[in-house]
Image (tube, rainbow, N blue to C red):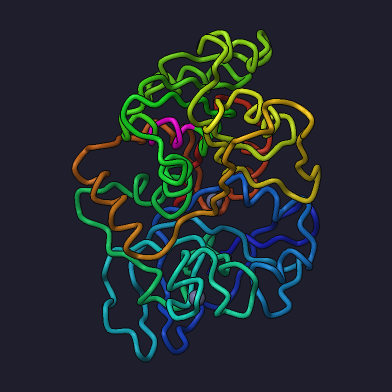
């Protein structure tokens, strides 16, 4: 089968590999659509073995890493012990797979699983291939209703769950004010989540005009181009110098994290979902009034079949429509081009649908 593999830092190649076989508790899925995500770029460009060991125990090396963790497909083969799925079922898997049995799976979230030997849930590598394997399938896989498109199903595996997670974990609700820093695909999902939760004022910040246009479509009341204006000063002015109830950091940079701490009101919450990479590490000034009496919550993609089933219900019934996030379509054989395009942030690119 055709698979997209990292061959060295910054480089992927298409390779011909054997179709995987499911072991105990696993299923193998025939991919019908996959996509590239910001986290793929961290794995491609910078994360060394130490970080892989953190998220995928078992000595996976940066060279030879099977790429991709967001996809939808049809069950091809079912391993021993799997009873919830049959070949032919249309399914998705969470991008972080949990064992379903450890303390973190039972009390925190499957994304924080320690039962697979790592320190956070295991990343589902290898979705940018004709077939991919999912461990602990009973815990991590959900059936996709007929009324949900492949595009929508793919989003429920990661960025929709993560973007909405920024809003739920900050407990933003009816009438609350929310500022969201960065309107890449993840930040746009947070914007749509703030709208779905009934927030009163949704302010979206980015430097790319096409992304700000999309924010308006997905629910932002006000957009700020960070190239033209000092976004933090503008948000303070829009809120009468009080600040917003919730400030979401959705890209993973020092500057946007700091901006969130500056615009959140006393008693408010900074909700961080960006993936920061190896550097810079975040820090914040503490000898300033904006340090005191704030909440900071961080979230990694809330995972597991129940979470995805809730998101799929919203998509199936039209409570949220994110189809517009898919701006480009490419064949699997051209997956390396998808990485170049995604990295360039040109041509208005948001999500790229990759099909066999
Ligand atoms: Zn992702
Ligand atoms: Zn677990």
The location of residue 240, given as percent across then percent down, is 52, 9
Q: Nearer the viewer, residue 27 or 130?
A: 27
Task: In the rendered view, tell whether residue 146 sits above or below residue 200.
Answer: below
Residue in view at x 48 percent, y 84 percent? 21
In the rendered image, residue 186 lying in the magenta stretch gets the answer no
- Snapshot quadrant of residue 142: bottom left
Which residue is rendered at x = 42% and y = 53% of the image?
Answer: 33
The residue lying toward the viewer, choosing from 74 and 43, is 43
In terms of image quadrants, where is residue 47? bottom right
Q: Position of residue 215 (x, y in %)?
A: 45, 23
Quadrant containing the C terminus is bottom left
Q: Quick one: 130 or 127, which is closer to the camera?
A: 127
Question: Where 54 sits versus 226, above or below?
Answer: below
Residue 57, percent from left and from top:
67, 76
Q: Is residue 151 above or below residue 13?
A: above
Q: Is residue 320 shown above or below 88?
A: above
Residue at the spot 70% in from the left edge and 46% down from the top edge: 276
> Can you tell which quarter of the image residue 346 is in?
top right
In the image, the segment drawn in magenta is: 188-193
Residue ID at (45%, 56%): 302
């Amino acid at each position: 089968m055709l698979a997209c593999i990292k061959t060295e830092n910054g480089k992927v190649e298409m390779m011909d590999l054997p179709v995987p076989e499911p072991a105990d508790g696993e299923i193998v899925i025939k991919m019908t659509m996959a996509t590239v995500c910001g986290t793929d770029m961290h794995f491609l460009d910078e994360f060394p073995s130490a970080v892989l060991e953190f998220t995928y125990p078992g000595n996976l090396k940066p060279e030879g890493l099977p790429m991709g963790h967001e996809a939808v497909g049809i069950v091809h083969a079912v391993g021993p012990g799997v009873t919830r799925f049959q070949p032919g079922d249309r399914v998705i898997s969470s991008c972080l797979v949990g064992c379903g049995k450890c303390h973190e799976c039972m009390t925190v979230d499957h994304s924080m699983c320690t039962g697979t030997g790592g320190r956070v849930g295991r990343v589902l590598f290898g979705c940018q291939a004709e077939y991919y394997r999912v461990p602990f399938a009973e815990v991590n896989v959900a059936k996709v209703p007929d009324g949900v498109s492949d595009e929508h199903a793919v989003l429920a595996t990661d960025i929709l769950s993560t973007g909405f997670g920024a809003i739920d974990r900050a407990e933003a609700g009816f009438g609350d004010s929310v500022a969201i820093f960065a309107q890449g695909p993840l930040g746009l999902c947070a914007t749509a989540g703030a709208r779905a939760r009934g927030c009163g004022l949704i302010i979206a910040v980015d430097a790319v005009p096409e992304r700000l246009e999309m924010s308006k479509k997905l629910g932002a009341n006000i957009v700020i181009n960070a190239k033209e204006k000092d976004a933090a000063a503008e948000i303070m002015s829009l809120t009468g110098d009080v600040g917003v109830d919730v400030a979401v950091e959705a890209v993973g940079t020092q500057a946007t994290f700091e901006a969130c701490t500056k615009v959140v009101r006393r008693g408010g919450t900074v909700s961080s979902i960006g993936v920061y990479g190896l550097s810079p590490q975040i820090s914040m000034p503490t000898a300033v009034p904006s340090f005191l009496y704030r909440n900071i919550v961080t979230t990694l993609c809330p995972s597991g079949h129940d979470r995805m089933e809730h998101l799929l219900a919203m998509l199936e019934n039209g409570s949220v429509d994110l189809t517009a996030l898919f701006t480009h379509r490419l064949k699997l054989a051209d997956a390396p081009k998808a990485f170049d395009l995604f990295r360039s942030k040109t041509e208005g690119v948001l999500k790229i649908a990759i099909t066999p």
